[in-house]
Structures are given as C-alpha cells and as structure tokens.
Image (cartoon, grey):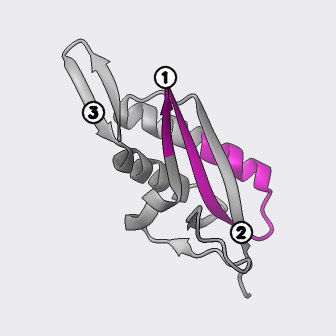
Amino acid sequence: MSIELNTKFGQIDISNEVIATIAGGAAIDCYGIVGMASKKQLKDGIAEILRRENFTKGVIVRQENDQVHIDMYIIVSYGTKISEIAHNVQSKVKYTLDKTAGLELDSVNIYVQGVRVTNP
C-alpha cells in the first residue's frame, strides 16, 4: 500500500515502508528512546529492539479517507518521563514527515512496549 499525494505537477506515491523508515529514524533521535519494538513480538514480557532496516515492523502507517495515521511501538529508557518522551516523538515525527515528504499526519499514536534498565 502507499500514500497518494496530488500536487500541481502530478501524483506522488510514497510507500508505507518509506514513511515507516522516516518516522522510525526520527523517533530514534529523540532523547529517552532506546529503540523501536515490533508490535507483534511481545512475548513473556520481553520486547526486542529493532535495527534500522526493520523499523517497518514497529511502525504502522494507515490511511483512512484523506487522513494519515501512524502507530509507533517504542522502548524507552528507565528513569525518564514517558509522557514527555511520547510527546517529543509525536512532535518530531510530524515535523520530519512534513518537511521530508510533504505529508501532514492527523495522528501519531505511541505504544510503549517496554522500559530498558541499564546497568551502571
């Protein structure tokens, strides 16, 4: 599936994988994010961190009518305020997709799949 944008020069089709990769890269740059998690992989309370080439498993892009929605599954670091991290990710993903792809998002939903505790 892909997102269709109509411009004065013609039609642009952007695949969902490209949008997911851009959104995942923007999310990883935010403070407090350890990594992306797969939405289907949570087993025994353990979420595996996805590498950059697998961001599409942790980011779901949906288009309903003319509205674009993104669901992101993330892992945060211990000791950080989860609501602030989620808000920062939402803002950065919306800004990045608007500037790089010209895509305006209607919602960015954040699902925290785990908290990573690091040893000192």
Q: Check residue 45 for magenta coloring.
A: no
Q: Which residue is mark 2?
A: 114
Q: Which residue is mark 1?
A: 65
> What amino acid is found at the position of numbered circle 1 in the picture?
Asn
Tag in front: 1 or 3: 1
**In this picture, is 1 found above or below 56?**
above
> What amino acid is found at the position of numbered circle 3 in the picture?
Asp
Q: Which residues are magenta?
A: 61-90
Q: Position of residue 55 (x, y in %)?
A: 45, 60
Tag in front: 1 or 2: 1
Quadrant in which the C terminus is drawn: bottom right
Label 1 and label 2: CA atoms lie apart by 32 Å
106, 101: nearer the viewer: 106
60, 27: nearer the viewer: 60
Q: Are marks 1 and 3 in contact (CB under 8 Å)?
A: no
**In this picture, is 35 found above or below 95?**
below
100, 48: nearer the viewer: 48
Q: Which residue is mark 3?
A: 13
Q: Earlier in the sequence, mark 1 or mark 3?
A: 3
Local crowd size for mark 1, using a 10 Å CA cut-off: few (<14), some (14–19), many (≥20): few
Q: Earlier in the sequence, mark 1 or mark 2?
A: 1
Q: Check residue 70 for magenta coloring.
A: yes
> What amino acid is found at the position of numbered circle 2 in the picture?
Gly
